[in-house]
Image (spheres, rainbow, N blue to C red):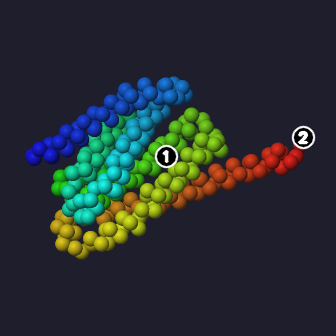
Amino acid sequence: MDPFNQLILVISVTSFFTFQWLFHRVSPWLSVRISPGFLGLSDKQKVEWNSRTVSTFHALLVGIFCLYILFFDDAVNEDPVWGDPTLVKTNVAITTGYLISDLLLIFYYWKAIGDKFFVVHHLAALYAYYYVLGQGMLPYFANFRLLAEFSTPCVNQRWFFEVLGYPKSSRPNMANGVAMAVVFFLVRIGVMPVYYSRMYAVYGTEAFYLVPWGGRVAWICSSICLDIMNIMWMHKIARGCYKVLRSAHRSKAGTPQENGKTD
C-alpha cells in the first residue's frame, strides 16, 4: 500500500471514531446546553436526536469541502473521470468513515433509528466509493454527488422542531421549510443538467471505456436511481411547503385584526 492510500485509510478510521465520539459524547453534552427540551425527550428520541446532530455536522463539513473542490480543483474539473483525485479521496474518506459509523449505530439502535432504506443507501454509497478510493476513478462525479449533503441540515432541523413541539405554522418551522425546499431543489434538482451534461460529454470516450463495468454500473445506474428518488422527494417537499404556507396565509388573513373586525 502506497503512503497516500495509507493516509486515506487513516482518515477513514479517524472519521469513524470521530463521529462515534460526536454521537456518544459531544451531541448529548451540547444539546442539553443549546436546547433544554432535549432532557424531556424519550430515550429513542435522544438516540435519533444525536444521530441527526452528527448527520448535520457531517453534511456541512463535506459539503463545504465539496464546494471548494468544485470551484478550485482544476485537475478534477478538467478530467472528470481520471483527474487527480487527491482532494476528492480525502472528502470521500471522511464520508466513508461517517457511513460506517452510522451503519453501526443503525444496527445497534435498530428499535430507535433502524431503517432498511438507510441501510441500502449507505451500502450502495460505500460500493460506489470503493471505485473512488480504491481506483481513483470518477472523482468529479463522486464529489458532485456530495453537494446533495447541503439539504441534510434543513431536513434534520425539521425533525428537531417537530420533536420539540413547534407548530408547523410557527415562523421558525416555516422559514426552515422554505429553506429546505429551496436548498433541496438547488443541490439535488437544479444541478441535474450540469451533472448529466458532463456525463454525456465523457460517454463513449477512451476515458469512459477505461472504467471497469462495475464502476460504470455504480456510476450511471445509481445516479439515475438516486435522481428519480430526488424528484419524488422534491415533489413531496414542494407540496408540503405549499400547504403550510397556504394554511398560514389563510390563518393570518382570517384574524379579526387583519379583516378590520372587532368583537
Q: Is residue 112 left or right of residue 261?
A: left
Q: Residue 53 appears at what percent x and percent y?
A: 43, 36
Q: Residue 5 appears at what percent x and percent y?
A: 15, 46
Local crowd size for mark 1, using a 10 Å CA cut-off: few (<14), some (14–19), many (≥20)? some
Q: Residue 111 appears at what percent x and percent y?
A: 42, 36
Give the residue type that dot 1 points to: Val
Label 1 secondary element: helix
Tell which circle, 2 or 1, labels the residue nearer the N-terminal end: 1
Q: Nearer the viewer, residue 63 or 135?
A: 63
Local crowd size for mark 2, using a 10 Å CA cut-off: few (<14), some (14–19), many (≥20)? few
To which quarter of the image does residue 203 belong?
Answer: bottom left
To which quarter of the image does residue 54 belong?
Answer: top left
Instruction: Return the residue found at the far right.
Output: 263
Residue contact between numbered discs 2 and 1, judged by CB atoms under 8 Å = no
Q: Nearer the viewer, residue 225 or 129?
A: 129
Q: Residue at x 35, y 62 (%)?
A: 223
Q: Residue at x 38, y 54 (%)?
A: 147
Q: Which residue is mark 1?
A: 155
Q: Is residue 259 left or right of residue 26?
A: right
Q: Is residue 107 visible?
A: no
Q: Which residue is mark 2?
A: 263
Q: Residue at x 59, y 53 (%)?
A: 241
Q: Is residue 181 left or right of residue 26?
A: right
Label 2 secondary element: loop
Q: Is residue 136 left or right of residue 251?
A: left
Q: Residue 213 appears at what percent x and percent y?
A: 20, 65
